[in-house]
Image (spheres, rainbow, N blue to C red):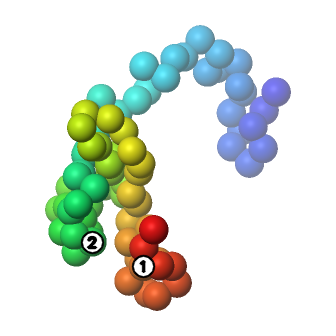
């Protein structure tokens, strides 16, 4: 099977695992971090998302788009 538009055969990737392609270091933020601080963190790190960690547990993911939506008034903070 060829992936549409990419010309890639899915069997080329048949034996690859997530471990082989993942980003080894996760960027994390605290849930109490201010929105502007999170935006600055993402920009300085040149990243698009960060894991939100509280008490060593994953509680969510914040993305650059999440921050833009709130700043643009298209979404209220949860």
Q: Looking at the image, is 39 positioned above or below residue 52?
A: below
Q: Residues within 10 Å of mark 2 (few under 14, many from 20)?
A: some
Q: Where is 10 relative to 14, above or below?
A: below
Q: Which residue is at the far bottom?
A: 73
- Describe the element under mark 2 as helix, strand or loop: helix
Residue at 28% over, 56% down: 31
Name the residue carrying label 2. Answer: 35
Q: Residues within 10 Å of mark 1 (few under 14, many from 20)?
A: some
Q: Residue at x 52, y 17 (%)?
A: 17
Dot 2 and dot 1 residues touching (CB under 8 Å)? yes
Mark 1 secondary-structure assignment = helix
Farthest residue in the top direction? 15
Disc sitting over residue 53 in the figure: none
- Quadrant containing the C terminus is bottom left
Q: Position of residue 26 (x, y in %)?
A: 28, 38
Lower position in the chain sequence, tag 2 or tag 1:
2
Res 34 quadrant in image = bottom left
Residue 8 visible in rendering: yes
- Residue highlighted by disc 1: 70
């Amino acid at each position: 099977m060829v992936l549409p538009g990419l010309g890639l055969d899915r069997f080329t990737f048949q034996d690859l695992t997530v471990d082989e392609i993942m980003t080894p270091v996760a960027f994390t933020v605290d849930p109490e971090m201010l929105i502007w601080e999170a935006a600055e963190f993402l920009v300085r790190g040149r990243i698009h998302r960060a894991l939100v960690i509280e008490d060593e547990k994953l509680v969510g993911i914040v993305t650059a788009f999440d921050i833009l939506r709130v700043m643009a008034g298209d979404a209220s903070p949860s």
